[in-house]
Image: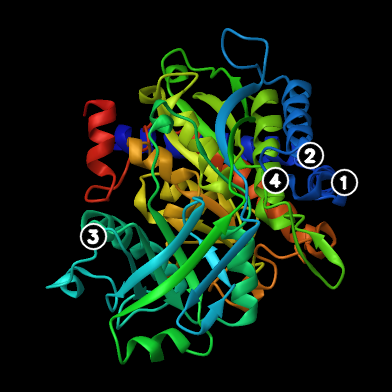
Amino acid sequence: MKKSILLTLLFTFTAFIYAQNDIEKVKSTVSKNEIKAHIYFLASDELKGRQTGTSENKIAAQYLANMLRSYGVKPIPNTDSYLQTVELNKTTGVSNASLKIGNSSFDQIFTLNKINANYDDKAIFVNYGLEEDYKNVDVKGKYVICIMGTKDEKAIRASFSMAREKSALAKAKGALGIIEICNVDDATQARLSHYMNGDGMSISSSNDSKKDDFVHLWVNDQNEEINKLFSTQKESEISLTVEGIAKKIIYSQNVVGVVEGTDPKLKNEYVIYSAHYDHVGIGKPVENDSIYNGARDNAVGTVTVLSAAENIAKYPTKRSALFILFTGEEKGLLGSKWYVEHPVIPLDQMVYCFNSDNGGYNDTSLATIIGLGRTTAEKDIINSVSQFGLKAIDDPAPEQGLFDRSDNVNFAAKGIPAPTFSMGFSAFDEQITKYYHQVTDNPNTLDYDYLFKFFQSYVLACRSIANNPETPFWIEGDKYYEAGKKLYKK
C-alpha cells in the first residue's frame, strides 16, 4: 500500500513539474507584441480582406509560409515547399437578375446556384415546396415558386439548411428551376446579395464536366406581392433573367508545415493545429469603408496557430505536429475539403485536429471551445486555459451549428476528433454580429491583453494534448464516434 501511494505521489509530482515546465515554455515564446504585429499585417487594408483567389490572399499565404520557415517548422514532406496547391472552380457573380410575375417586377434576387437563366413561361406555386405540396400538381418543364422555409421555421439559417432538399425535390418532379420567396429587411438583403450574388467557388473535381441547368433562386418580396397573387391562383406567367455568370479554374494555397515529435513511438501520431487565413474581401461600402479586414475572423485564429508553431518548433512535443492554414473557408470550407482528400500524411496518423476559428468575443474571462466535451482531451484543454486565468466553456449557441461551420468538420467527418478553439463568447449576440463579417472587424478594435492570455492558453493546450500518454478520441456516442473507430480500426 505504501509503495503504491509513493508511486502515485511520484507520478503526480512529475506531472506537475512537467506541466510547470510547459507553462514556462509557453511564456518564453508567446509575445503580445508579436501577436499584434501579425494581426495588424494580416488584417491590414493592404491585404484587402484576403479573399480566396486574389493576389492579396496569395501574399498572406506566402507570409505565413515564411513565418513557419523562420520558426524552423519543416515543409511538406518530400518537398521544399509549405504551399499545397488547391484547385478551384471560380464562378463569377451575377451582372443582371430580374423577375417579373404578373404586373410586379423584382430585382432583389439571390442565386443559390450560379447558373444563367432566361425563361418566359408558366410557373406554378407549390406552397412551401415540400413533398405534400406536390400532390396532384404537374410541374414538369416549368418553374416552381414556393415560400422560403416552412410554416413553422422561416429563419435564414434554417432555410439554407432546407434549400438543398427543396431543390432536389423540385428537380425530381421535373421542374426546370425553383424560386423561393423571402421577406428580409434591407440589411439582410445587402448581406445575402454580397454572399450569394458575388463570385462563388467550389472544389474542382472530375465531375465538373457534368452540366446542370437547374436554377435555384431566392427573391425578396418585401411587399408580399407574390403571396397576394398566388392567394387567388396557383399558376402565373413569369419572365426570369439571370446573366453574367461564367466559370474558370483558379488556384489557391493551403499553408502546411511539420514538426517531428520526440517520443520514439508517439511521434508516429500527429496533432493537427489548423485555422483558415482567408476572409471575405471587398464588399458593399459602409461609411466609406469597403474592406472586410477579418481581424477576428480569422487573423486571430491564424496567428494562434502561428504561436503554436513557433513554440512547438522550439520545444517539440512527444507527438508530431502538423500545422495547416486553410484557404477558401469562407467559400465553403474548401481548403480543408481539398486537404482531407489530398493529405500530405495519411489521415489515420492524425489523432486530433485542434482548429482555431472566431466570429468575435463578448466575455474576456472565457475561452469558448466548440466541441469541448466531445473528446477525451477536454481536461487537457480546461486545465491549460485555467493556467492563464481564463475559463473554458463549450458551445453556448448550439442553434448556430458552429461545429459544422468551420474547417474542423471536414476532419471530424473522416473520424478525427476536431474541436474549435474560439475567443470567449457566452451567446451569439449583437456584440458578435457587430463585427462578424463586417467592415468594422479591424485590428485596432481588439483587446490584446485578453488575446495574450487566449494565445497562451491555446499553446499550452496544444502541448498538453500532444504530450498526454493517452491518445485522444471521441466520447462514445458522439456523432463521429463510429467514423473514428473506422478510421483508426478500433
Whether residue 479 is situated above or below residue 74 in the rendered picture: below
Residue 1 or residue 389, whichever sits in front: 389
Q: Amino acid at mark 4?
A: Gln
Q: Secondary structure at mark 4?
A: loop
Q: Which of pointers 3 and 1 lies earlier in the amino acid sequence?
A: 1
- Name the residue: 75% across, 41% down: 30
The answer to whether mark 1 and mark 2 are in CB contact below 8 A is yes
Mark found first going from the N terminus, 1 or 4: 1
Residue that label 4 marks: 51
Between the C-alphas of marks 1 and 2, the distance is 8 Å
- For residue 348, the mark is none
Q: Is residue 321 above or below residue 410?
A: above
Measured from the top left, where is residue 325 in percent x and y? Answer: 62, 35
**Disc 2: which residue:** 56
Q: Nearer the viewer, residue 290 or 112?
A: 112
x, y percentage for residue 420? 50, 50
In front: mark 2 or mark 3?
Answer: 3
Q: Nearer the viewer, residue 274 or 99?
A: 99
Which amino acid, mark 1? Answer: Glu
- Find residue 46 and name its label: 1
Instruction: Answer with left or right where residue 333 lies relative to residue 45.
Output: left
Where is mark 3, residue-wise?
140
Q: Earlier in the sequence, mark 2 or mark 3?
A: 2
Q: Quadrant of the C terminus?
A: top left
Q: Earlier in the sequence, mark 3 or mark 4?
A: 4
